Amino acid sequence: MLTVPVRQLGESERRAVERLLDLDPIAGAQVAERVAARGLAWWRAEGRVLGYGSRRRLESICWLGGNLTPVLASEPAVAAFAEQLATEERICSSIVGRADAVLGLWDRLSAYWGPARDVRPHQPLLVTDALPEVPADPQVRRVRGGEVDLIFPAAVAMYTEEVGVSPLVEDDGRAYRRRVTDLVRSGRAYARLVDGQVVFKAELAVVTRQTAQVQGVWVAPEWRGRGIATAAMAAVVRDALLRVAPTVSLYVNDFNLPARRVYERCGFRPVGTLATVLF
C-alpha cells in the first residue's frame, strides 16, 4: 500500500519544484525550462507536474505533457507515479529521463500503455563546461530568421532518421515547423551551408540557467565520413558557452559510436544515463 499519494502540483509549490530541479539540473533540464517559461498552472504550461512526497517535503516530480519525464524519482516515487498514470489514457509520445526511473515506469506501465515503438535503455548523458580544444568550423553559424524554409527539410530528415517517424505525419508538420521557427528566431539553431544546402545542423533545444542542451545534430548523408562533425560541433559548443549557458549538455544513443567519438573530442564527459521509450 502506497502511503504517500501522488498529487498534481500548482503554482503555490513552484519554489519547491524549482529547488528540486536544481538538484538534477542536467537530466531535469527539459522540465526546468518549461517550469521557468510557463510555471505550474496546467492551462499555461501545456502539461501537468505531478509530485511525490509530503507538502512539507517534495521528493520527486514527474512532468506529463507531450513527454513523460520523471525527475529525481526514487523507487517508491516511480511506483506511485505508475499507479496514478495507469488509470489514465496515455497522451505522451515518449517517456524520457534517467534510465532507472524511465525503465521502472515502463516496467509498470507497459501492460496499460504498450506496446512501445522503440525502447532505448542506455543513452549516455554528457556535459561540458570548457571551450573545445579542437578547432571550431568558422562556417557554422546561427540560422537567420529568413532561412526557416532552408533549414526545415534538414530538420525533418533528422527527426525522421532519429525517431523513426516523420514529423509531417501529424498535422502535416505544422507544430514541428512552429518549433523549428521558434528555435531559429531565438538564435538557438545552427547550420553550415554549402552552395545553399544544409550539410550540418544542430539546435539548443533546451536552455536553462544551468545548461544549454543540444539536440537535432545532423550531417547530410553525402557529407558523412568527411570529418566535418567535430569542428561543427565545436563551433556550436563554443557559441553556446560564450553566449547562452555555463554548460552544454546532450544525450546520445549508446550504439551511435561515431557521434560519441565526436562529442568526446569536443570535451563532453558522462554524467549519467538516460532512457527513452517511444510510442
Image: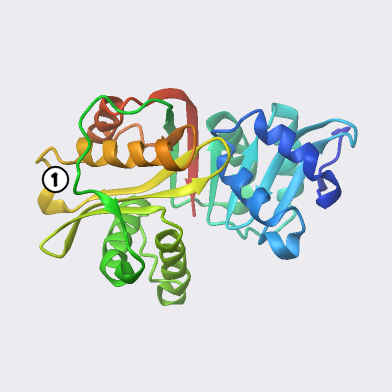
**Residue count near mark 1 (Cα–Cα under 10 Å), binned few <14, some 14–19, many ≥20:** few
- Residue 69 higher or lower than 188, as above or below: above
- Residue at the bottom extreme, as displayed: 172
Q: Is residue 155 rendered to the left or right of residue 171? A: left
Vertical relation: 65 (above or below) 132: below
Residue 85: tell me if it is visible.
yes
Q: Which residue is mark 1?
A: 224
Residue at horizontal 53%, vertical 32%?
A: 99
Locate residue 62, reporting x and y percent: 69, 43
Residue 200 % position (x, y): 22, 51
Name the image quarter holding the N terminus. top right
Q: Mark 1 belongs to which amino acid? A: Arg
Q: Residue at x 77, y 58 (%)?
A: 41
Residue displayed at 49% across by 55% down: 279
User: At 19% from the left edge and 41% from the top edge, which residue is drawn?
Assistant: 137
Total labels: the figure holds 1
Coloration of the structure image: rainbow
Instruction: Out of 100 and 20, give the one closest to the viewer.
Output: 20
Question: Where, by quadrant of the figure, is residue 54 drawn?
Answer: top right
Q: Secondary structure at mark 1?
A: loop
Query: In the rendered view, does 5 fall on the left or right side of 218?
Result: right
Which sits in the foreground, 182 or 270? 182
- Residue 64 in sight here: no
Q: Position of residue 26 (x, y in %)?
A: 54, 33
